[in-house]
Amino acid sequence: MEYLILGLLILSPMTGYELQQFIKKNLALICSHSAGSVQTALAKLEKEEKVTATETVQGKRRKKQFSITDTGRAAFSHWVAQPMQADKVKNMELSRLFFAGLAKPEERRRAIRDYIRQMEETRGVLCAIQAHFQQMNPQELPPGTDWPEVLRFQGYTIQYGIAAADFEIGWYSHLLYELEEE
């Protein structure tokens, strides 16, 4: 979560609420978007002097806007340059499939049907995000960032998510077909 926040703050300073809403809207499939997760990560980053906060008052509300520091930029640059770790990707839901033989046949089929439905919804959300990204005009974004390159790799992430959802829908649909033929 910390590196995700650092990356977002490189793009633009944000409040905790803005970070949470951005994650909820665009990255909820990658990580938690709970206020607690975001606030905990921000507190840790602030303590490590990787971000700074500026407080302002708007009406009766205090607003705390976070910006990345040079230390934060260095930590993020080091992290993003590292190879991705295949062993870090875990899907605990596969444990349900592993033990599905212990469930009643109709329970297994129902669970798989529901999972396919959820993956179809996930795919729909990703396609909507992809459409939003395709409509973005980099010239309308704040200057100082190579937006076409940033958007390019964000687009790859969305494409990956759609392809993964397509794979899971197809794989589980085939499994369901096999189970219904028994």
Image: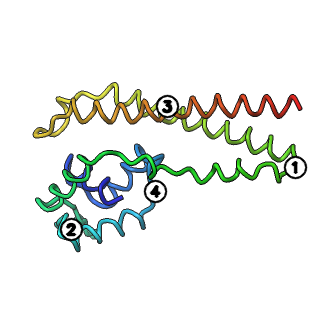
Q: What numbered label is drawn on residue 32?
A: 4
Q: Quadrant of residue 147?
A: top left
Q: Which residue position is annotated with label 1?
A: 104
Q: What numbered label is drawn on residue 152?
A: none
Asked which secondary structure carries label 3, the reply is helix
Q: Is residue 9 left or right of residue 34?
A: left
Q: Position of residue 30 (x, y in %)?
A: 44, 48
Which of the two labelled residues, at mark 1 and mark 3, occupies the earlier sequence position? Answer: 1
Neighbour tally class for label 4: few under 14, some 14-19, many 20 plus, Cα within 10 Å: some
* Residue that appears at 19% across and 32% down: 140
Disc 3 and disc 2 in contact, CB within 8 angstroms? no
Q: Which residue position is annotated with label 3?
A: 162
Q: Which residue position is annotated with label 2?
A: 57
Neighbour tally class for label 2: few under 14, some 14-19, many 20 plus, Cα within 10 Å: few
Q: Is residue 24 left or right of residue 62?
A: right
Which of the two labelled residues, at mark 3 and mark 2, occupies the earlier sequence position? Answer: 2
Neighbour tally class for label 1: few under 14, some 14-19, many 20 plus, Cα within 10 Å: few
Q: How far, Cα to Cα, is label 2 from label 4? A: 28 Å
Asked which secondary structure carries label 2, the reply is strand
Residue type at the position of mark 4: Ser
Q: How far, Cα to Cα, is label 4 from label 3? A: 19 Å
